[in-house]
């Protein structure tokens, strides 16, 4: 089932998350208190709203209680971030990611109900957006406009197969450059087996990585 997302706060960081989610064809609602910020994303996001997220009723009217994952990307306004997080928790939002500018606030937001707290200097918006879209993508590093390196977790239901038999390069046009298995790193050759619960380090184009991720984790 396709996950739904909302991003509250459309400054530079929030804007980048919204754009990358849109690039991944994700269902995303972009929210900001200021009309000019909403207008900035309206060209590539269908669902936008001007809203004061410190008012719980306004968030409820927007249907936030039915959103799977909400990012609070409000910058330079600690009070607004706190009130917004409290409101989202009260509405029953399952996954709440909060952007903070100082690590000393991490535990405060965890206590308030945030499932994850990030500092922009520690995690790029593009990496965060790609990890949000897929539960199996653990890390994401963009090399250039075409290629990325991604860590993908293999489903516990995956039936063991060798890299060559899967046709990693011929069928999916990607390369497995490393495997993390039971906490240890190994550099695989073509005959190495892909096992369930492996973490694969993959290099390739985004669309090809997504196809391979789907193959690894299809029900």
Image: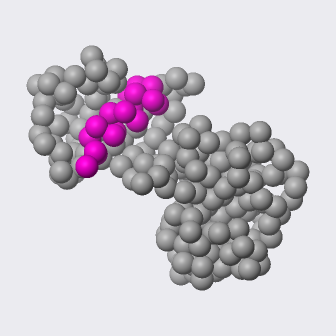
The percent coordinates of residue 70 (x first, y second) are 59, 63
Residue 95 versus residue 28 in the image, above or below = below
Residue 194 within the segment the image draws in magenta? no
Residue 65 versus residue 178 in the image, above or below = below
- The answer to whether 96 appears left or right of 31 in the picture is left
Q: Look at the image and name its color scheme.
A: one colour
What residue lies at 81% left-to-right and 52% top-to-bottom? Answer: 38
The percent coordinates of residue 40 (x first, y second) are 81, 44
The percent coordinates of residue 174 (x first, y second) are 34, 24
What residue lies at 59% left-to-right and 73% top-to-bottom? Answer: 65
Residue 24 versus residue 128 in the image, above or below = above
Total number of numbered discs in the rendering: 0
- The answer to whether 188 appears left or right of 126 in the picture is left
Q: Which of 91 and 89 is in front in this view?
A: 91
Classified by dominant secondary structure, the portion drawn in magenta counts as helix
- The answer to whether 10 appears left or right of 106 in the picture is right
Quarter where residue 164 is shown: top left
Residue 18 versus residue 66 in the image, above or below = above
**Residue 78 visible:** no
What residue lies at 22% left-to-right and 45% top-to-bottom? Answer: 198
Q: What stretch is highlighted in magenta?
A: 203-219
What residue lies at 65% left-to-right and 69% top-to-bottom? Answer: 63
Q: Which of 4 and 96 is in front in this view?
A: 4
The percent coordinates of residue 17 (x first, y second) are 63, 48
- The answer to whether 171 appears left or right of 190 in the picture is right
Q: Tell me the quadrant of the picture where the N terminus can be found.
A: bottom left
Residue 204 within the segment the image draws in magenta? yes
**Residue 42 visible:** yes
């Amino acid at each position: 089932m396709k996950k739904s997302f909302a991003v509250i706060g459309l400054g530079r960081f929030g804007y980048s998350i919204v754009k990358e989610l849109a690039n991944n064809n994700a269902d995303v609602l972009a929210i900001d208190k200021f009309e000019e910020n909403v207008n900035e994303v309206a060209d590539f996001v269908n669902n936008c709203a001007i809203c004061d997220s410190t008012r719980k009723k306004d968030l409820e009217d927007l249907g936030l209680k039915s959103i799977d994952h909400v990012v609070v990307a409000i910058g330079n306004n600690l009070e607004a971030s706190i009130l917004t997080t409290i409101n989202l928790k009260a509405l029953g939002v399952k996954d709440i990611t909060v952007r903070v500018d100082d690590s000393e606030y991490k535990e405060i937001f965890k206590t308030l109900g945030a499932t994850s707290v990030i500092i922009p200097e520690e995690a790029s918006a593009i990496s965060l957006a790609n990890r949000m879209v897929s539960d199996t993508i653990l890390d994401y590093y963009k090399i250039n406009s075409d290629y990325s390196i991604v860590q993908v977790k293999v489903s516990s239901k995956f039936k063991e197969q060798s890299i060559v038999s899967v046709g990693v390069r011929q069928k999916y046009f990607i390369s497995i450059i490393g495997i993390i298995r039971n906490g240890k790193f190994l550099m695989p050759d073509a005959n190495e087996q892909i096992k369930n619960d492996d973490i694969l380090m993959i290099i390739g184009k985004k669309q090809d990585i997504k196809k391979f991720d789907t193959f690894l984790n299809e029900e």
